[in-house]
Image (cartoon, coloured by chain):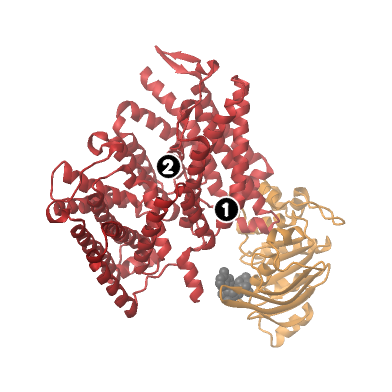
Amino acid sequence: MTFLLLQALTGLASAATLFLVAAGLTVIFGVTRVVNFSHGSLYMLGAYIGWTVLGHLPRTPWGFALGVAATAVALAVLGSLLEMTLLRRLYRAPELLQLLATFGVVLIVQDAAQAIWGTEDLPLPRPPWMRGFIVIGAERFPSYDLLLIAAGPAVLAALWLLLHRTRWGTLVRAATQDRAMLAALGVNQRLLFTSVFALGAGLAGLGGALGLPLGSANLQLDLSVITDAFVVVVVGGLGSVPGAFLASVLIGVLQAAGVALVPKATLVIVFVVMAVTLVLRPHGLLGRGGTLAREAEAPALVVPATLAARWLGLAALAVLAAAPLFAGPFAVAVLTEAMIAVLFAASLHFMMGPGGMASFGHAAWFGIGAYGAGLAATLLAWPLPLALLGAVLTAGVVAALFGWFVVRLSGVYLAMLTLAFAQIVWAVAQQWTDVTGGDNGILSVWPSGMLADPRAFYWLTLALCTGGALLLRRVLFAPAGYALRAARDSALRAEAIGLNAAHLRLAAFALAGAAAGLAGGLDAFSKGSVFPTYVSIGRSVDALLMVLLGGVQTMAGPIVGAMVYTGLYDLLLQTVALWRLVLGLAIVTLVLAFPQGIAGALRRGQA
Amino acid sequence: MLNVSELHSFYGRAHVLQGVSFQVAPGEVLVLLGRNGAGKSTTLKSLIGLLRPRAGRVEFGGVNVAGWEPHRIARAGMGFVPEDRRIFTGLTVAENLETGRQPPRPPLPAWTPARLFALFPNLGQMASRQGGRMSGGEQQMLTIARTLMGNPRLVLLDEPSEGLSPLIVEQMAHAILALKQAGVTMLLAEQNLHFAARVADRAVVIESGRIVWAGTMAGALADAASHLQV
Ligand SMILES: Nc1ncnc2c1ncn2[C@@H]1O[C@H](COP(=O)(O)OP(=O)(O)OP(=O)(O)O)[C@@H](O)[C@H]1O
Ligand SMILES: [Mg+2]
């Protein structure tokens, strides 16, 4: 009993820092409608800056308080700069591009933090006053954790007062509902948005500094925090501060209880909580429906290729097929990678363009396929064809199961749910060491017999990936594909003519998942190994970049995008040390240059 | 006070305002008459800056404000009351008024919630009620009161009588006349000729994005009786 109580208290303590991050994220979203992927990076910077600042201050409670406050202010300033230079230009962009651009910031901050603070974890040495404890039953409980537990409700109350008892708060709540009307009443939105962003970033910094004594400042904080914060914000209801509080307590306590009772299943519990909430209350615990309404984005049309383009494609295919006869082993390896990327991108495109579901966690299916194939080949000693089939089926079936939740959602909720699911698959891959090997991965997944020759394997990859992409195209231009697009453009109208939108979307989701699984399985055999990085957010973003680079409107788009991207990426990795910084800057620049997407820019160019 | 000349506005590629010109003199109430889809709301939105005009001038107090952002135009003293009311439903009546508050603009006396509650007695009784829990008529009054909190010199009113019961329309007409007494200049978009006749001094008629008639309200009524179909 005491044990459970202690676990619950520990959960509440971690809920406090989680709430600080989530509250900032949700307030920013409420007003600006931007889902700030880099919010976890702000938290991480809070931890690092807090570590530096606190190291220079007296190790007394007052010194600590001062250092934490200074960190929050520093982050508020950084946040305002970020808003003024980047986010301000993104308010009208499609939400997927907002996510992408802020993910670019994540990459930049990662390399910057590594350059400044190094790769070592930086724990905060606890001064004596922080090592105090109280005794519960026969156990000790740190009094600093009690302080954190109190901080959550205190910040909630302060935020409530700020939002409900000041003119600024009134304007913020009004802007959450109707920014244009507020502007017509004489309110300068820019000032309001920048200040909201400063508040959110300050809260993230506060969380980072306050959470420092529980762990350390390290380079993994950003993505782990943002995933938890996304879950909290979605469960609590986007834009709702009290909702974020409720959800952070719920998830913090469940996580702590999970660690104690079923250590292996903690992440699954979090996911189940989120899924159940979204099924019962699609807008989260305290979220309000309708506040999410955005100006409808122009639907992307997918047009069949012209005859000339088809001949060009056929010629390219012939060159690709003949490539191993004159190209060296390195070129063959890169081409294999490019073909796998083509199928991966085409499967995401199938979901996004015609299906209208912009997944931010497409790596989940790729990773499940890779692990499926890898495990089948090593543990079960299945031959390659059987292992690949296993990969496809596993990814397809899991996608169908998960898709049941996803197809009910759209926009930000869909992006966040898919992202969270991918993160959970990633965590499983990393933590279930008995089966997946954890960070060591699965090794020696080589094709045997004839296919051991890289050229033969390349031909197989070429055949399967082109075949897969063509199959997706075929479905797209078959009656089912038109029905799918009808369902995307208007679910209501589609239902009126007897199409079941949810079923169609589910089928599309499962099919796309299976295709990505095939790509993942092929990649496992091509590289001879499977690692958790196959399921990382970076991998999901790769796919998105390929699709957006090539454009959503044509089937050729993702294919060209995948080839170009693979080439550039390999080049970048080999030549630049700070490749994340460069890639991040490239993403941000790309989005700023084409806030409507490259495809959108082309469309306007034609008009 | 307001001098609009050759205003052109677009929604995407649709050329909706095709050279709109008219003037509003200080202290007068001008009504912009036109059928559904004639371009009344588009004109008002182009004046306040919610829609950026592609060409033309909007001289407000001697300054061309065309192309300015809405909040700057509003702070220059132009108030806008939209046709769909756009009350902040999650905020109380008092908070809705607060969102509109801007510094006073001497010599006109500053609007306060107390003065506005005197003008719209219904509102005074529900100061702490949520905007979403009000009737259409009450919301219409609140949206006008909210705009007045900005102490505008000129108020753009988009169909204030639309969808209201005759009793409320009557109250609305009283309120507008009281505002006129208080020295507020108004530009009113209307389809309801009877309502316009009660409050307006002059009228301009818009058709397919062009001004096709201008004159006194009495003249407009006489014309309407003969051939003008509004
Ligand atoms: N947001 C919009 N996008 C595209 N076209 C629009 C939009 N709003 C209005 N229009 C078009 O512009 C024209 C003028 O519309 P406007 O709203 O100004 O008319 P109105 O005179 O206010 O009509 P009503 O009496 O119905 O309010 C109409 O043809 C309308 O279809
Ligand atoms: Mg109108």
Q: Chain of mark 1?
A: A
Shade representing chain A: red
Image chain in orange = B
Query: Are the residues under badges 1 and 2 in a single subunit?
Result: yes
**CA separation in Å, label 1 and label 2:** 22 Å
Q: In what element is the residue under mark 2? A: helix
Q: Nearer the viewer, mark 1 or mark 2?
A: 1
Residue matched to label 2: A227
Does residue B29 appear in the picture of this structure?
yes
Q: Residue at x 68, y 59 (%)?
A: A184
Q: Work out whether residue B195 or residue A461 is closer to the camera in this orientation and state it.
A: A461
The image quadrant of residue B38 is bottom right
Q: What amino acid type should be assigned to the residue bearing mark 1?
A: Leu
Q: Chain of mark 2?
A: A
> Looking at the picture, how far across and down is residue A156, in whole percent?
56, 34
Q: What amino acid type should be assigned to the residue bearing mark 2?
A: Thr
Does residue A289 appear in the picture of this structure?
no
Q: Residue at x 63, y 36 (%)?
A: A73
> Looking at the picture, how far across and down is residue A476, in whole percent?
30, 68
